[in-house]
Image (cartoon, rainbow, N blue to C red):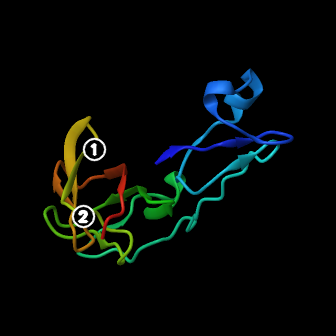
Amino acid sequence: MGISTLRGAAQPVGLSSATPADVALAAVVGAATTAARGDHTHKVADSGWLTPTLLNGWAVYDATFGNAAMYRKIGPIVFLRGLIRSGTMGATAFNLPAGYRPGIRMLFGIDSGGAYVHGRVDVHVNGDVVPVGGQNAYFQISCAFPADN
């Protein structure tokens, strides 16, 4: 990662000789990338929200709160969100496909139960998303992590 060189009208402009307008255009990007004046768009792959198959008795909490569980990948970051209920605590709620999995087991604190009970959801390197702490009256998932697997 590095700071890109900005191209001026006649020659590249480095940050040491940059004008305030040039500095405003600077972005942390890959070493081979340059940003031209007026080029403020850096395209990042976005999978859009995807809905997994729920397992082990986990179900949509209520249509009022949207989809049961969803995942999305923007660049190298995976986002999980949703509200599920009634499943078996300690059992996989759903599985993330290859390319959406962390390189190490990730642990996230969440809200569950109904009386502000704290819980935990684990995301395993094999893609299993497992509610391991809290209550299953409802189980809120909201987290993000790098996709390394």
- Specify the amino acid type for callout 2: Gly
Q: Position of residue 95 (x, y in %)?
A: 30, 74
- The Cα–Cα distance between marks 1 and 2, rounded to whole angstroms, is 21 Å
- For this view, does 32 lie left or right of residue 120? right
- Specify the amino acid type for callout 1: Ile
Badge 2 element: loop
Tell me the residue at 45%/58% (across/down): 62
Tell me the residue at 35%/59% (across/down): 84
Tell me the residue at 38%/73% (across/down): 99
Which of discs 1 and 2 lies nearer the camera? The answer is 2
Q: Residues within 10 Å of mark 1 (few under 14, many from 20)?
A: some
Relative depth, front residue between 62 and 38: 38
Q: Is residue 50 above or below residue 16?
A: below
Tally of marks: 2
- For this view, does 88 lie left or right of residue 37? left
Q: Residues within 10 Å of mark 2 (few under 14, many from 20)?
A: some
| Residue that numbered label 2 is attached to | 103
| Residue that numbered label 1 is attached to | 110
